[in-house]
Image (cartoon, rainbow, N blue to C red):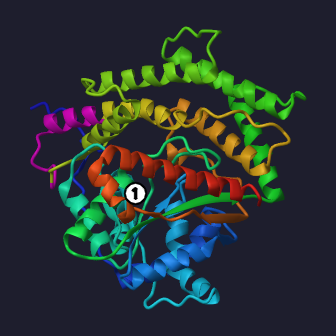
Amino acid sequence: MYKPYIKPVSNIFPDIKIKEPRISKLVIFTVRVLGRVYLFFILGITRIVLQNGKTLFEAYKRSLENKSRCILAFRHPYGGEPQILGWYILFKLRSKARKAGIKFCRRPYISFVYGFEVSRWGGKLVRWIMQGIGAMPVYHSKLDSASMNRIYKTITDGPYPLAIAPEGQVSYSAQTIPRLEQGTIRIGFRAAELLEKNGKDCPVEIIPISFHFRYGWMGLRSLNKLLRKIEKYTGFTNDGTDFAGRLGRTRDYILEQNEKRYGIIPDSGQSFNERVDVIMDAALNKAESLLAITRTSGNLVDRLYHIRQIYWDRIVIPGFKNLDHLSLLERAIMDLSAGEAWHASRHMELVDFVWYFRVPIPNETDPLHIKIEYVQNLWDFASRTMGGAFSNRIVNARPKMVHIQIGSIINLSERLKEYKENKKTAIANSMEDLEKAYLDCIDRAAEY
């Protein structure tokens, strides 16, 4: 009897169950041993400098003594901020605080909030580490009351601060603030409400934290090498054109290739940013078409998150413990669906990056860190155009130093009366103050 050759792949997997977060001594020991090696060899960091550290030390002391509840609202421009912050808090903060004359009543710790998709693409090792350091996953586009209740409980019970990125994901820009999501402020206000309801006189404090990389002469060499790589991919040669001109022509070439890809007739009267807006809409339309999505929101970021959620749900099947019970035909159809989702995600990944890449081209006289950031992102623009994702970014400009700037504290409990009277206004005002705190950090970092 004829037996068709169907080999189930593959690229779809049963659901990944995340164990309840907990603090594992083994995981902490592993992070301590391997963390510094990771920071140096993977991220290229040789030194971490904390600016305005006394504000963080005192906030941590209050939190550890159950005199306050603390949320570390860290910016996420480069991608490695959680690793840097986590390592510094766990293994450096106590000694640094002691040198500043501040003694903690217990060892400092930190609880992270991260996107659920990390557990899917990160693999078993990442899941083991995240679960063992007590990190808590959340969905961007799904309601998950269990995860939110776990986060509220972590804040209200204390004593360890909660770390969350208000930008929602990597923002690719340390010099500007492209967007902030309201989730951090909303979580803080809800925690303040719960504490008041339970009769606890324990203010909820938001600590803004900003990261800034600085480079030495090797960074300049890496910049020139990466720019030559971009020119090789785009068909240009270094013919004496100035620095800004080299960036501009490669950027515009990549833009034009995306317009051709989506059948867009360019309008010469439009700016780069306006042309990018057209490309992003076309890319999301393409992804939604591949996934047969009926658009439920006109908000570009909401559309992107929705596509990302469906993509992962087709690659990693929610609710399935295993797929052995499926027929070969069923498995093949699910493989095809997963493949379609992967192709759709390539369009989503382009939008995921290019939304943030609407910044001016730097000049030769601009600081080295600004030029490196732009060239790194210019390569990412080319990479996403070729079907790449965040994992394809080339981080070959080795940062010599990381400056961690601590911003002014935002006490949400003091604003609770305003929040009860008008939630929208209270959240908007707090978001404005959070952005201002980040801008002040950026200004201070410019001095280094």
**Quarter of the rendering containing residue 346:** top left
Magenta stretch contains residue 140: no
Q: Amino acid at mark 1?
A: Gly
Residue at position x 64%, y 10% in the image: 269
Question: What stretch of residues is rendered in magenta?
Answer: 321-338
Screen quadrant of the N terminus: top left
Residue at position x 78%, y 50% in the image: 368
**120 sits left or right of 255 in the view:** left
> Where is mark 1, residue-wise?
122
**Relative depth, front residue between 397 and 323:** 397
- Give the x, y percent position of residue 132: 34, 74
Q: Residue furthest right?
A: 240
- Give the x, y percent position of residue 287: 36, 26
Q: Is residue 152 visible?
A: yes
Q: Is residue 386 above or below residue 374?
A: above
Q: Is residue 128 above or below residue 1?
A: below
